[in-house]
């Protein structure tokens, strides 16, 4: 298992070692010991308490979401079926990369995962016919503390790798605020 640092501090791509033969494949998708040894150096201990899964069709964009303290969540995300473009935006005011984003392709083929610490907005768009997306979280869901930033905010200028007219949003995601009017709680 490789832990690959990104240009944004504390956001890490995890690339598994995959063992393949004529029967199929095997890989270790999570190890708390390896996670703590490779990611825990700059952030407080992350103890995942819940696994979630979503199924979406081509063009579905979910995000950019986060939860405000004290219910902020760190996430470990992956795509079990299909292909997505996963995006995280740094919302930590004191960070050198505040307001910057990175994007990573996650797919059933590459089996990569992305660790998203607390203090980030997160979203993904489905680029395959269908995608099953899984994520671990380290804090409970608190509807009263959920928030987000508009997916196509001009400040970020995110290339979602899909034509805008093919994007499918929830009613809630269509009306999220802009970064310009955002006061970060992180």
Image: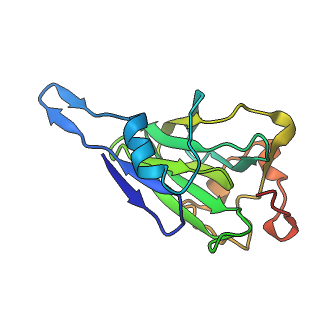
**Depicted 40 relative to depicted 183: above or below:** above
Q: Residue at x 79, y 66 (%)?
A: 179
Residue 48 pos. (x, y %): 56, 33
Q: Residue at x 88, y 67 (%)?
A: 181
Q: Quadrant of residue 159?
A: bottom right
**Depicted 34 relative to depicted 184: above or below:** above
Query: Which residue is more in the foreground, 113 or 97?
Result: 97
Residue 64 pos. (x, y %): 70, 53
* Residue 96 visible in the shown view: yes
Quadrant assignment for the C terminus:
bottom right
* Relative to 182, 59 lies left or right: left
Q: Residue at x 82, y 64 (%)?
A: 178
* Residue 129 visible in the shown view: no
Quadrant assignment for the N terminus:
top left
Residue 146 pos. (x, y %): 80, 43
Residue 161 pos. (x, y %): 53, 62
* Relative to 65, 87 lies left or right: left
Q: Quadrant of residue 98?
A: bottom right
Q: Residue at x 57, y 50 (%)?
A: 116
Farthest residue toward the left? 22
**Depicted 64 relative to depicted 55: above or below:** below
Query: Which residue is more in the foreground, 151 or 42?
Result: 42
Query: Which residue is more in the foreground, 94 or 67?
Result: 94
């Amino acid at each position: 298992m490789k832990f690959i640092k990104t240009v944004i501090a504390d956001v890490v791509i995890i690339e598994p070692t995959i063992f393949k033969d004529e029967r199929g494949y095997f890989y270790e998708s999570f190890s708390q010991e390896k996670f703590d040894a490779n990611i825990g150096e700059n952030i407080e201990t992350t103890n995942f308490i819940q696994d979630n899964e979503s199924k979406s069709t081509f063009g579905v964009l979910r995000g950019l979401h986060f939860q405000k303290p004290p219910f902020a969540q760190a996430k470990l995300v992956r795509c079990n079926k299909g292909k997505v473009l996963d995006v995280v935006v740094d919302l930590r005011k004191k960070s050198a990369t505040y307001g910057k984003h990175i994007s990573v392709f996650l797919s059933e083929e590459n089996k990569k995962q992305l660790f998203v610490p607390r203090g980030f907005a997160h979203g993904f768009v489905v680029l395959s016919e269908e995608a099953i997306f899984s994520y671990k979280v380290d804090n409970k869901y608190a509807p009263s503390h959920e928030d987000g930033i508009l997916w196509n905010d001009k400040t970020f200028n995110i290339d979602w790798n899909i034509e805008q007219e093919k994007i499918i949003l929830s009613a809630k995601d269509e009306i999220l605020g802009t970064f310009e009017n955002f006061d970060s709680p992180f």
